Amino acid sequence: MKKIAVFPGSFDPITKGHLDIIERAVPIFDELIIGIGINTEKKNLFPLAQRKAWIEQVTSNFNNVKVADYQGLTVDFCKSVDAKYIIRGLRNAGDFEFERSIAQMNADLANNIETIFMVARPELSHIASTLVRDVIRNGGDVKAFLPKGIMVDIR
């Protein structure tokens, strides 16, 4: 049986922190699906098609990575793609508290899907999409936070 994992998020935009988690998860699983969650109540800075294209671009060198979008519960998406693992990145204790609650709720909803936490590398732990969006909105330089492949599209 293939080991399939989902790395869910809005990826608005994908950051060097996200890419680091992807690169570290790739060798662990037979297939890693980057799941772009669609939350109709959330106003994204970048359209879904752009976020998907960026992820596909920066992960193109991995033959076991797929990109898909989904609506609804992450565990339901996992079931639809036969994933038994959810990957979540943790930058700090606040992330842990938030993600732990979600992981416990997901375990109640689907006890055969395991959440795996991957701790951010210290040099990337300050990078959050929310902060990156704020820098972009205010005309700041984001090249230190984003994979090289998406820089041209943002400027």
Image: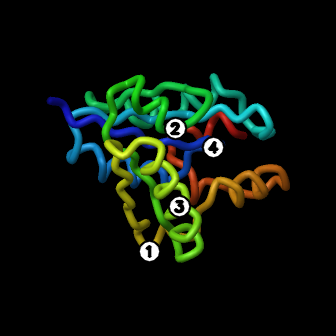
Q: CA distance from mark 1 to mark 3?
A: 19 Å
Q: Residue 122 has which mark? A: 1
In front of the other: 123 or 111 = 111
Residue under numbered circle 2: 74
**From mark 1 to mark 4, how far is it between C-alphas?**
20 Å
- Answer with mark 3 or mark 4, whichever residue precedes in sequence: 4
* Pointers 1 and 3 in contact (C-beta within 8 Å): no
Whole-angstrom CA distance, mark 1 to mark 2, is: 27 Å
Could you say where residue 107 lies in the image, as x and y percent from the top left? 42, 50
CA separation, marks 3 and 4?
A: 20 Å
- The label on residue 99 is 3
Q: Amino acid at mark 3?
A: Glu
Dot 3 crowding, Cα within 10 Å, few <14, some 14–19, many 20+: some
Circle 4: residue type: Pro
Give the image location of residue 11, x and y in percent: 59, 42
Does 61 sit left or right of 123 as displayed?
left
